[in-house]
Amino acid sequence: MGWNSWNKFGCNVSDKLIREMADAVVSTGMKNAGYEFVNIDDCWQVSRAADGTIVVDAERFPSGMKPLADYVHSKGLKFGVYTDAGRMTCQKRPGSYQHEAQDIKTYASWGVDYVKIDWCYAEGLEPAVQYPKFRDAIAQSGRPIVFSICNWGVKAPWTWGPRTGNLWRTTGDISDNYNSMSVIGFSQDGLDKFAGPGHWNDPDMLEVGNGGMKRDEYLTHMSLWAILAAPLLAGNDLRSMSDETKSILMNPEVIAIDQDKKGAQGHRVWDEGPLEIWVKPLADSSQAVGLFNRGESPLKITLDFNKIGAPPSTNLRDLWQRKDLGTMQNSYTAEVPKHGVILLKVSK
Ligand code: GAL
């Protein structure tokens, strides 16, 4: 869990922005809610020195990366950077191709805790050959660095990702609208068998709070990502979050579903037209259940307890309302708003 600069700020990153965001992670309560990493995405790097060392943009990061990492650490947070396994990053900054070990060594010397490695300008290269170079360099660096593989699902990263990195993107980029988010989120069914503690499918970072979706749509986004046990990297401006955004990003019961220690990714158990039911098994043998309406008007959904292996008499809790619904017999029917969700915890 953490924050990343890309979705909101794109190339507009700087020392000042990252420090302010680290401050905001703490002052807004995001840190207490579990968000820990502060990650700079593309555009912090400009060139290479004669010896090949990566050169940081001195205008945007005048004191360099080490003091910035120290600042983030001083807040009790962790620090991440971005590079690319190809010849250039997607924004045409120097890539790490043929500098894999050198770059990881540099990051380790700054105190980097997380590295996201993209796949632009990698023509003719094999992801299953290039990405392990970074894995091995991280092992040799002696620093524990979370390794995020970002090759958009190309060549089924879930097959080689688990032995290579800690998370791997499964799709192209998310954008801040319901169509993009829902197409990505609802297409993750079947990938659950590849995920588990320490190695996760990554359906991309959160857009919650960026303004392009309605509240019900952001509830769907957050619920689906929690059921998918997805990495939760906020992508909004934490310095100016509305109370509504805070309540979505920091609902402790929804975060607990995402972070549940069983580490199981959920899957779809039922669908009919625009209606889908997804289930995530939890460590305490209860289940998180999402009743989703992808349609354009409110619709009723019925959850049959026997379809999810729950007993005829079952306890339900609504995790967005944060309210016990009581013990129900055989099934539960509710109206779900357009593009919305009811997220339940189902237990004996
Ligand atoms: C894309 C990547 C995005 C972002 C962007 C930066 O390839 O999927 O998440 O990192 O590059 O240029």
Image (tube, helix red, strand yellow):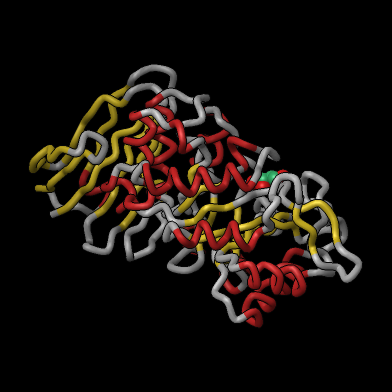
* Nearest to the observer: residue 179 or residue 60: 60
Q: Can see residue 157? A: no
**What residue do we see at 38% from left, 40% from top?**
249
Q: Give the left or right position of residue 324, taking residue 153 as reference.
A: left
Query: Which residue is at the far front?
Result: 63
Q: Nearer the viewer, residue 73 or 116?
A: 73
Q: Is residue 332 found left or right of 79 in the rendered image?
A: left
Measured from the top left, where is residue 141 in percent x and y?
64, 79
| Number of numbered discs visible in the structure rendering | 0
Provide residue 276's location: percent of width, then percent of height: 39, 37
Q: Inspect this view and state whether residue 228 appears.
A: yes
Q: Give the quarter of the figure containing the N terminus.
A: bottom left
Q: Nearer the viewer, residue 162 or 302?
A: 162
- Horizontal relation, residue 210 to residue 81: left or right: left
Residue 3 lies, with reference to residue 50, above or below; the image says: above
* Figure check: 343 above or below 161: above
Q: Is residue 184 left or right of residue 135?
A: left
Name the residue: 60% across, 34% down: 175
Can you give x and y, in whole percent of width and height, for residue 296 in the image? 44, 18
Q: Quadrant of the C terminus?
A: bottom left
Query: What residue do we see at 33% from left, 65% from top?
Result: 262
Q: Residue furthest right?
A: 50
| Residue 314, horizontal then vertical, whole percent | 13, 48
Q: Which residue occupies the extreme top position in the image? A: 297
Residue at the (29%, 39%) spot, across then down = 343
